[in-house]
Amino acid sequence: MARLKALSSLVLVTAGVLLGLRGLHLALPMLFPTTRQGPILIGALQDIQRQVGFAPLVPAYRPEVLGNQPERIAVWFSPDPACEVIWRTGEHDLVVRQRRGGPQPSVSPLAVPLEGIAESSWWVASGRSHLVLRHMGFWIEIETSLPARDLRRFADTLTPY
Amino acid sequence: MQVLSYLWQVTLHSCTMGIIFYGWVSRVGLPSGRTRMQLLALLLTLPLVTAAIPGRAAVEFGERLAWFNSARLLAVPLPFHFQAGHVMALAGLFFVLVTVWQEVLPALRPIGGNAPAAPDDVVAQVRAKRGWECCDVRVTHPEAIALATGGRPGRPTLLVSRGALEKLTAEEFAAVLTHEHAHWLEGRWWRTHLLFAARLLQACNPAALWAFREYCNEVELECDAAAVAEHDSRMFARILLRLYQETDGRDVAARAALRRRVDELTATETPERDLPPFTVPVVALVMLGVLPWLV
């Protein structure tokens, strides 16, 4: 009985230390945002799911001026898993950021809802069009140098890659 | 860079194990003895293995799968653009210097040197011990009582201080000699030196520094037990007390170790029972299951 007590004591102490470490693991990015791990650059859209655990939502509508392949793909692991995909050629670009959970991304005071799309806000600033929306449990941010009319097309054609 | 990362992982695992062991051993009141020594040996060696498990260095492992990612801890910002990682690196460097100064340099110093040979009767007494038939016995100058061994199995060297020859009675000298000889029996020399090598591999690790010193204290207690098995324990305790009095008061660690040895020899209460032999393999399995998830 005493022997089992000794081993159960080991399990108890180990569990205590592990819980302490886990608490530290979760608390540090909240207390010090710079300790967040990311961005991590990756090579292909299909790698995003393996890295952060969800498939990226990519607009099926992409004008040819943006090019075929993304120029940059990055992921963040904490505090909430997120990814960013950028298409860019010449003077035009499209940036799609996707985050699972967390607070709503900041929006301009001039933002207005995009008609027909719930939980969305769009605005234009410094010649760039912005759209923030909640879709399939994700916060999506779309930012582009293309005209504001393309925002709806991007939003309407978001599909998991 | 990979070596530094590995050493940090070893230190992380070792410190975590050290905290777990310290808390557990304090709770169960584990006495000195076999289990304690095996746990300390485990603490010195297992992190070298768990830190080398492949696939744990990737960022995605640390952020998605690991229970604790120390990269977050190392990235904690400090004033003047420093990060916690810089402080850890400085601490590691400090422990490397401590290791070189207190452990490597003394180990490299030649044993005996030009010290004169011991009197024939002392040499005969020493060479009568099993395995010490070729032992080189030399007398050193200090007036304090001191006996130390060096060399390697097959070519051991025993240093006896002039003070020991003058101040100890024949029976006391024999008891101290039995203690020194015990260091070379039952694989203790090999175990201690292998663990010393493991300790040097992680010179920057404070937990390894502590664990190795604790292990050496346990070996001293084991050798004390061998000495009092053949000689009077109260007499041996009195010798240790004289050594305690002769030791410089600033050498807190040495005096604490001597006091503990005297306490063990003069303990009147029956010591608590050691844990069963399967304990250490179970502990090793638990740690093998836990540590790889800390990166």
Image (spheres, rainbow, N blue to C red):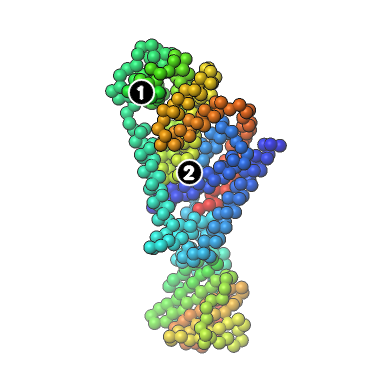
Total labels drawn: 2
Residue A52 in the image, given as x and y percentages of width and height: 54, 64
For the N terminus of chain A, the quadrant is: top right
Q: Residue B93 carries which label?
A: none
Residue B141's image quarter? top left
- A105 versus B53 height, above or below: below
**Alpha-carbon neighbours of circle 2 within 10 Å: few (<14), some, or many (≥20)?**
many
The CA span between labels 2 and 1 is 35 Å
- Whether residue B184 is visible, yes or no, is no
What SS does tag 2 mark? helix
Name the chain under label 1.
B
- Whether residue A130 is visible, yes or no, is yes
- Identify the residue under disc 2: B207
- A40 versus B101 height, above or below: below
Looking at this view, is B200 or B97 the one in front? Answer: B97
- A112 versus B127 height, above or below: below
- Identify the residue under disc 1: B143
Which residue is most to the right? A1
What SS does tag 1 mark? loop
Residue A153 in the image, given as x and y percentages of width and height: 54, 84
Residue B273's image quarter? top right
What residue lies at 45% left-to-right and 29% top-to-bottom?
B244
Residue A21 in the image, given as x and y percentages of width and height: 55, 54
Q: Which mark is in front, 2 or 1?
A: 1
Which mark sits nearer the N-terminus, 2 or 1? 1
What residue lies at 39% left-to-right and 60% top-to-bottom?
B82
